[in-house]
Amino acid sequence: MTAHRITVAGDRPYDVVIGPGVQAELGLLLAGTPRAVVVHSRALAAAAGAAVETLQEAGVAAEAVAVPDGEAAKTAEVAAGAWEEFGQLGLTRSDAVVGVGGGAVTDLAGFLAATWLRGVRVVQVPTSLLGMVDAAVGGKTGINTRAGKNLVGAFHPPAGVLADTDALAGLPEAEFCAGLAEVVKCGFIADGRVLELLAADPSGRADTTELIARAVQVKADAVAEDLYDTGRREFLNYGHTLAHAIERVEDFTWRHGEAVAVGLVFAAELAGQAGLLAAADVARHRDLIAAMGLPTTYRGDWEQLQAVMRVDKKARGASLRFVVLDGLGNPSILTDPDQAWLDAAWAAVNDQSTHPATPTETA
Ligand SMILES: NC(=O)c1ccc[n+]([C@@H]2O[C@H](COP(=O)([O-])OP(=O)(O)OC[C@H]3O[C@@H](n4cnc5c(N)ncnc54)[C@H](O)[C@@H]3O)[C@@H](O)[C@H]2O)c1
Ligand SMILES: O=C(O)C(=O)C[C@@H](O)[C@H](O)[C@H](O)COP(=O)(O)O
Ligand SMILES: [Zn+2]
């Protein structure tokens, strides 16, 4: 099977390569680089080992640096520990960082690359579906703080992204499913074909590579126009205002994609309340997301969630801003929606009678 190659345009364009075995291109991408550190969690030690080997065969002195798994990687303490290791390894500006893992590790690896010596190259090798379709692409890097998700970070585009679909064979089903939340998000905001493919096969297994390529194209188009998130890129945040609040309130024990799934239903309900989205399209959100095996409801403290939403990066001063759809495929920003609309949208996702156990409990 030939690989898909999607170029993300910008000052320093780069390719996202998608397909089986594409990790082997790492040596080519970093040829001539004296040294590289491969940042990974222990869960991905084998994939990181393969990356180190590929680099060494290409003449790059490569070392693996292990960090905690999942959201536990995205802390100031972990970043500080990695900076110390980079110092001991003597990483200079001609060297590079390679991120191997899910979105949490690629977010951290990107942040380390953005901050070390005020910026060294990073190549991302995402191993989760969510990392391939979203996190590893676009140069948003960051870590969490007690106040919220991704509150510290930098825009630091990668030098390349190698989405090796062979890695998905080892990805747990619940993680694959969580990654589909970002895929269906791209369907709702920009690419109706994604919605058709997922409606025909909600598991996402029949057309995985096409779905990855379509989601990456949606992201590439937004990032190329608006790297710094001041306009069109904000639409990629569809569903994330509530999602990030859920993640924070749940102490980052909810999968990002599962929180996004609830956030998408909430955002659709909000647009319905605002008279922007037809009832059938609101129902389409809920039905498709449920068919995909993702949560559509959440039981939580509405006052607390609203307080956390106020530190969302889209907020401006006292104004809350939400990405909503003014019809499918037509995202826009809704500023300071009526409290009654917010309360009604919350009531629609806070349906305790159908609420399952938290996703990580059922994994
Ligand atoms: N920077 C961005 O633009 C952006 C976009 C979307 C999401 N994100 C971030 O990405 C993170 C979520 O990423 P995620 O869903 O990949 O979660 P994750 O990184 O926590 O990975 C989920 C789990 O899957 C495991 N895993 C990953 N690949 C595997 C494989 N091939 N085989 C077996 N296990 C594997 C990981 O070890 C981890 O336990 C969140 O922190 C989110 O904020 C960032
Ligand atoms: O790339 C973007 O821009 C996105 O909004 C993609 C999101 O899926 C992603 O979760 C991102 O990390 C959220 O960004 P944030 O700025 O809200 O932290
Ligand atoms: Zn996201």
Image (cartoon, helix red, strand yellow):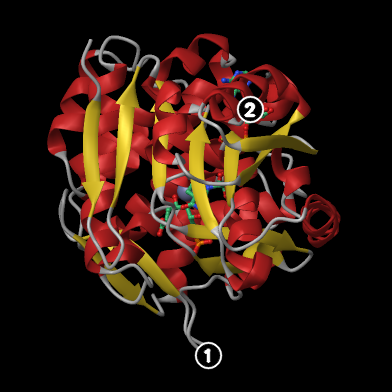
Q: Nearer the viewer, residue 126 or 57?
A: 57
Residue for badge 1: 317
Mark 1: few/some/many CA within 10 Å (<14, 14-19, 20+): few
Out of 26 and 261, give the one closest to the viewer.
26
Q: Quadrant of the C terminus?
A: top right
Vertical order, 53 against 299 (above or below):
above
Q: Position of residue 231 (x, y in %)?
A: 28, 74
Residue 221 in the image: above or below residue 354: below
If the picture is divided into quarters, which one holds ligand 1?
A: top right
In depth, the one of 239 and 78 nearer the eye is 78
Q: Position of residue 9 (x, y in %)?
A: 22, 57
At horizontal 59% and vertical 41% (from top left) the residue drawn is 99
- Nearer the observer: mark 1 or 2; the answer is 2
1, 133: nearer the viewer: 1
Residue 54's place in the image compared with 315, above or below, is above
Q: Amino acid at mark 1?
A: Gly
